[in-house]
Image: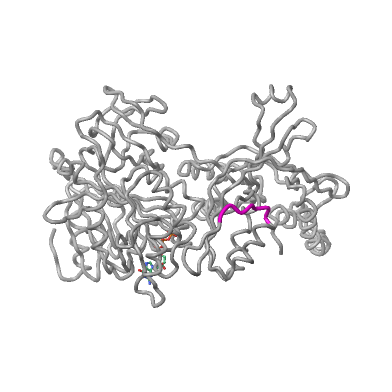
Amino acid sequence: LPLQRKPKNMAASLFRRVSQLKVYRRKIHSHSLSCAVFRHRWMKRLPVVSAMTYYCHGAFLPFILKETLDLSKFPADKIRNFCIIAHIDHGKSTLADRLLEMTGAIAKTEKNKQVLDKLQVERERGITVKAQTASLFYSHQGEQYLLNLIDTPGHVDFSYEVSRSISACQGVLLIVDANQGIQAQTVANFYLAFEAQLTIIPILNKIDLKNADPKRVESQIEKVFDIPRDDCIRISAKHGTNVEMVLQAVVNRIPPPAVSSDDPFRALVFDSNFDHYRGVVANIAVFGGRVRKGDKIVSAHLGKTYEVNEIGLLRPDEHPTQRLYAGQVGYIIAGMKDVKEAQIGDTLYLQEQPVKALPGFKPAKAMVFAGMYPMDQSEYPGLRSAIERLTLNDSSVTVQKDSSLALGAGWRLGFLGLLHMEVFNQRLEQEYNASVIVTAPTVPYKAVLSSAKLIKEHGSEEITIVNPAQFPDRSVVSEYLEPMVLGTILAPDAYTGKIMALCSNRRAIQKNMVYIDDQRVMMKYLFPLNEIVVDFYDLLKSLSSGYASFDYENAGYQAADLIKMDILLNGRSVEELITIVHRDRAYNTGKAMLQLMENYGGDITRKMKLLKRQAEGKKKMRRIGNVEVPKDAFINVLKRKDK
Ligand SMILES: Nc1nc2c(ncn2[C@@H]2O[C@H](COP(=O)(O)OP(=O)(O)OP(=O)(O)O)[C@@H](O)[C@H]2O)c(=O)[nH]1
């Protein structure tokens, strides 16, 4: 490719030259980071050439990568698979950017911020929602290494993504903000990696900050995780300080995957996406043997056979290769039409060489349920297809049809947590232009049935209740159970009193309390999930002036004195307002909901007068029992949202 002085001319000349080539998949932008993959028509038998162009500080840096990049040069001992884990905002994505730049996977430019955060919600909220993978080439002491980096989300709702990323790795970079120190998710993520017996490299980030206190944070790491302080690497991901040391530590400290290319092929599916043109793109970690284009592979879960259409590395964009070998991490496209065919945790093997499936993952369990309805019933088909398409890429969302007298036909969706639910909602709106009504979230309660007839009907003694309206009557139940979580709170000790009062108000039982240094306390509490799902985190943050952090893990079910609370409007129970509450909470919860109704009361009379004059006024009312309530008021009560 020719290099000319002016970037614009360069772009024009590049476009002229590639006009003979078939543009393959990617759009070309002349003024932004552009990545184009071209397939040469008259060189069919030769390797397909991928040209990547980068617009960087006013100059193009074109270079060519061959699709036939010979991955056999990277036997398992030259491979390191690792992920980055940390508390939210401690700098995972920023460090990932630096690692990508230093190994030449992306160009060094202001525009390339958080390149692994691809979704619009990720960029807007500044959080990582979906784990991403990038293969990096790194040369160390005269040897070439292939480093596979998996960037993971930090928020508790997405810890499922963390655990499955961990399963494809031998080591982790545990990042801790040198100013904030260890936080609740640092602890939770540490244990995920520790229990999986991965090598843990502690990294203190943001040492450039004025208030950074790496010494104090190193002693926290020593005390809480029992990792020698000398193992810590002090860096500034923002400025690139000492990031080279991180790469060296990855090569020197993390063991290579213990696999062999001579074994039969088997690969673990650790993530999958749906592409409308090419079907399912599955991310795999090869645990043995090798695979190439044209191979017939079988998915252990469904026993279905597929032909491999394309395989390759993620850098972080897809880069096709001829083969993938044991120890390597990449993607595979094999004509699967539905993400359910590439289940996360599934094993792929060659048709002619069946192998034992790898231990997969426990499926993600929905912990928060809410009703979702179209604003108007005429929008139902559009919303249905939007939900179907979005769940194709997020298999942790559960979907059940539901209907309501006031809101019409809709769905009851299950999410991993409240943020997960909000993100899903935001994606529906942004990516599919759908407007939805979401009802107040509830948690999955259980009931142990005592009636033989009902046990027979349900096929089991225990049933899960995700819709409060279906709460079985006490006369047929021997016991109600509620989901519990073990919460970890880290905060400066000045707030301990306030935090303890908040927790006891939420029916929590203290399990443990330790000082991690002379000022910070770590507390463990057993909480009913229902008590923390909506506003606990916000309250905790505000009463600790933002200093407390919180994380939780599932802790099974416990018997609870639950009741079903009906709300009567003009003497009739309204199905949508039925709530499951702990007996002690019933009065206050009921009062709060009525208060909300009352707050909208003024609006109701005002709106009634207004709407009477409008022909379409009727449409905006919902007939509930024998009372007409403006739709807005009703929806806001359902959402438990005050004016
Ligand atoms: N001063 C300073 N700021 C940093 C450094 N590294 C990251 N940051 C800033 O910290 C904020 C959070 O960084 P991210 O990389 O988005 O954090 P993250 O851990 O990936 O966050 P999640 O993906 O949401 O979990 C951003 O505003 C970064 O610019 C650093 O070394 N020094």
Residue 203 vertical placement versus 436 (above, below): below
In the image, what residue occupies the spot 58% across and 52% down?
511
The quadrant of the rendered image in which ligand 1 is seen is bottom left
* Quadrant holding the N terminus: bottom left
Queried whether the magenta region covers residue 295, the answer comes back as no
Left or right of residue 389: residue 50: left
Q: Is residue 382 visible?
A: no
Could you say which quadrant of the image residue 99 lies in?
bottom left
Residue 284 vertical placement versus 201 (above, below): above
Return the residue nearer the eye: 49 or 482: 482
Q: Which residues are magenta?
A: 506-512
In the image, what residue occupies the spot 54% across and 55% down?
488
Q: Residue furthest bottom?
A: 210
Q: Residue furthest left?
A: 142
**Residue 234: percent from the left, percent from the top?**
31, 66
In the image, what residue occupies the spot 27% across and 39% down?
311
Left or right of residue 314: residue 261: left
Q: Is residue 351 visible?
A: yes
Residue 218 vertical placement versus 401 (above, below): below
Residue 71 vertical placement versus 642 (above, below): above
**Residue 549: percent from the left, percent from the top?**
52, 62
* Quadrant holding the C terminus: bottom right
**Residue 81: percent from the left, percent from the top?**
29, 47
Could you say which quadrant of the image residue 274 lies in?
top left
